[in-house]
Amino acid sequence: MPRRDSDSRRLCRRRFLSRGASALGAAALAGLPAPAIGRPGEAGKVRMGFVGVGGRGTTHLRTALEIPGVEVTWVCDIDPTRLESAGRLVEEKTGKRPAATEHHRRVLEAKDVDAVLMATPCDVHAPLYLDAIRAGKDLYAEKPLCITAAEADAIVKAAETSVSIVQVGFQSRYSPRVRDGIERLHRGDLGEAVELRAAFLAPFGPLRGWFSKRARSGDWMVEQAVHHFDIMNWALGALPLRAFGMGRADIFTEGEPDRDVHDYYTAIIEYPKDVIVSWVHSWLCPKGGAFGKPFLHVMGRKGGVGLLEGPVEYMDASRPKETLKEEGGNTTRFAQEAFLECVRARKRPFSNVLNGRDAVLVALMVRDAVYGRRVATMEEVKRGG
Ligand SMILES: NC(=O)c1ccc[n+]([C@@H]2O[C@H](COP(=O)([O-])OP(=O)(O)OC[C@H]3O[C@@H](n4cnc5c(N)ncnc54)[C@H](O)[C@@H]3O)[C@@H](O)[C@H]2O)c1
């Protein structure tokens, strides 16, 4: 079962207190500025820099500008047009233009930045996240944590020996609905978990550009499915053992001949205790929306729950169905607010580098299975095979 929140906080506090000195030393060795211990600033204000202000980064920026106690001091993007729009957006909302740069290291060196939010293409996550952690900045790191197992290990190691608070961009971990469903499962309301049925189906695609280059995104198992894989790991409190998969990458190549990601794939994923996941991930969704709704159903011996949609129902026909908690707001905002709370209290986020790494490991195992049309194991992925 996952570590309880209160345990995580105690652990994090201990690590923070005992490892401050080594993080200072590590930063000096890396030639980066020493971390500013004692953050955030007066009255709990958190000064933030946004690195990568494309689609997701701009959503985050807009969200942050609505949250009291946040000051956006820097924006950064290698694309000058996006940089200009982000600066303008901040100025329109606050009356103050943030500093702007195309070089993320300038944000990491800035004294008026407590925390950075990074939302760039996946292939640059690892170098940027490692730079941020080594600079001692707190980091909201968009998912996926990275695109290889070696990168995941390096980021976990860096984060565990740093003072930086690192939260991974799994906003579903802050969804009242998903939490309610998983809490019911963990306290036994549904009986022993037996089967998961899950699908990521989205009529807003297929996405193109860097997303459709395997070397940049890691393919959809890594770029997109990590959200669901993280929920599965959380729900089942374990990493899966092995997977078998198949798919096709020849459907949406028109106009994009070098597209090399999957348009559709499916996998059977085995978790410990014989819990089997049936997984589908597809862009083959007609635009009417009828065939494009993601779902994640967990079936236990006593009942089932739809974590993303649908009710809780029981095998016992006399027991009425129940509904999960309402979402009651925007999960990206909930995730950012939780990050700010962790920054202020110096505690480990609920969505952290460990579950960020675990979701990537599942993604890599499923990808190996799909590419090879074979059974791939978690052991192989962990060995780097
Ligand atoms: N949590 C979610 O629900 C969610 C949703 C969408 C995207 N994402 C993630 O957010 C990240 C960004 O996705 P997106 O949709 O915003 O992509 P995007 O292409 O719209 O934006 C990426 C931005 O990063 C900039 N960039 C690239 N390299 C950079 C660098 N070295 N320094 C600074 N800026 C750089 C690009 O110029 C671009 O503006 C990805 O990791 C994606 O998986 C998460």
Image (cartoon, grey):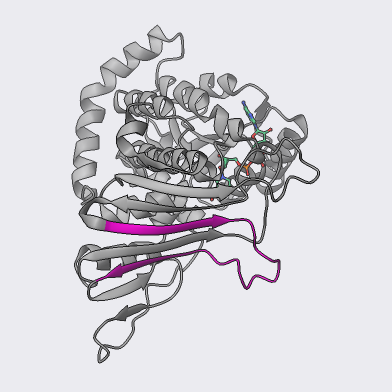
Magenta residue check for 89? no
On the rendered structure, is 225 left or right of 282? Answer: left
Residue 288 colored in magenta in the image: yes
Q: Is residue 43 visible?
A: no
Q: Is residue 143 above or below residue 265?
A: above
Q: Which residue, as the protein is rendered here, is positioned at the far right?
A: 255
Residue 125 is situated, as x and y percent measured from the top left of the image, at 52, 30
Q: Quadrant of ligand 1?
A: top right
At a point 42% along the width and 20% down the height, the residue shown is 134
Q: Which quadrant holds residue 289? A: bottom right
What is the magenta range?
A: 275-300
In the image, residue 327 sits, relative to residue 44, either above or below, namely below
Q: Nearer the viewer, residue 52 or 38?
A: 52
Q: Nearer the viewer, residue 85 or 36?
A: 85
Q: How many numbered badges does the structure rendering display?
A: 0
Quadrant in which the C terminus is drawn? top left
| Residue 151 seen by the camera | yes
Rendering coords of residue 359 (x, y %): 39, 43
131 over 115 or under it: above or below = above
**Rendered residue at 56%/34% (across/down):** 122
Residue 212 position, x and y percent, is: 66, 40
* Quarter location, residue 256: top right
Residue 210 is left or right of residue 192, and the answer is right
Picture coordinates of residue 265 (x, y %)?
54, 51
Residue plotted at (26% across, 82% down): 315
* Residue for point 25% across, 92% down: 318
